[in-house]
Amino acid sequence: MNTPGTRVAVVMLTLNQREVTLRALMSLMPQVEAGMQVVLWDNGSTDGTVAAVAARFPEVIAHQHPVNLGVASGRNAGARLALERFQPEYLLFLDNDLVLRPGFVAALLQPLEADPTVGQTQAKLLYLDEPGRINDGGGCRIHFWLGRTDPVGFKELDRGQCEQVAPCISCGGAMMVRARLFAELGGFDAIFDPFGPEDLDFSLRLQQRGFRALYIPRAVALHAVNHTGGASGYTAAYASSKARHWLRFLRRHGTPLQKAGFYAIGAPLIAMRLVFRELLRGNPGAITGSVRGMLESIRRTK
């Protein structure tokens, strides 16, 4: 049944993180007012997440999908459900490992309602385990030459240096967007599944359409992310996907000079660092995975 008059539909993606998801919803629900709806898209959990959410938050539309669609496709599926069911004016995408501070939703909404040229707003993220340190203080900086993306203010102590509203390339885990614009752009590009820079690609495509993306420091959330690194998740499949998606992203958004710089400077540096690091970790599969991903991506352009 459609719900008329919905201004904001929240879309949250989850996979086998029941307690983390419940914590995120607990921080969100006090900010849910009339004209807001919440959709949880479960990407194939087996830990009882949907049942737990239904019991604790019956007002949330919790949909359990039988398989993991990936990040881009999972977010798109949740957005389609929200759009079909509620016809909202705005979509708010939230990672399920966030804890929102009061006023978060209203702060992201205000610039969109005040200025029709603003298509997207993004929050400020601090670390949950170290709330005096910045996880994302202004969207993402893209270093095409080096093959790197870094959040503004990443790991810096929060001394007030990221307190100004500013244009940004928005990350996807704590951002609001005009629903009609999201649909017109086709949502996140599923070519980047199961994980990749689908959020940065979307923000750049939005700005190429003539809309602005703004970082809103009054919208603050704490992010429960492990930023210490580690080898356990850096498998051959992950390395292959990461390399393949970076080259796709570079071809789509890099200038000719940036592309030349990456192949001349960035790629050799990445290769040397990768070989050294993964050999020390005893993880040679990551090396072959990266090479395979790059070769596959290059072949597809011919």
Image (spheres, grey):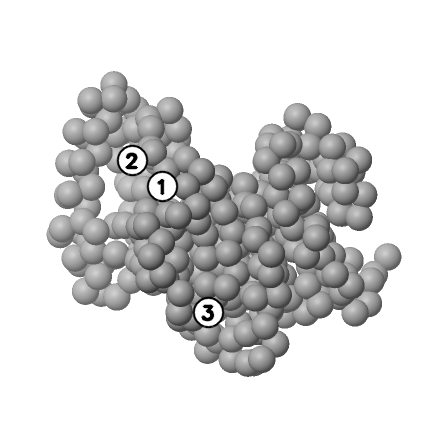
Which numbered tag is attached to residue 213? 3
Q: Neighbour class for label 2 at 10 Å: few (<14), some, many (≥20)?
A: many
Which numbered disc, 3 or 1, marks the residue closer to the eye?
3
Element carrying mark 1: helix
Q: Neighbour class for label 3 at 10 Å: few (<14), some, many (≥20)?
A: many
Decide if residue 145 is in sight here: yes
Q: Nearer the viewer, residue 3 or 58?
A: 58
| Residue 257 image offset from top left, x and y in percent | 19, 64
- Left or right of 282? Residue 132 is right
Looking at the figure, which quarter contains the N terminus? bottom right
Residue type at mark 2 is Ser
244 vs 260: above or below: above
At horizontal 78% and vertical 63% (from top left) the residue drawn is 34
* Residue of label 2: 290
Decide if residue 177 is in sight here: no
Q: Neighbour class for label 1 at 10 Å: few (<14), some, many (≥20)?
A: many
| Residue 187 image offset from top left, x and y in percent | 56, 59
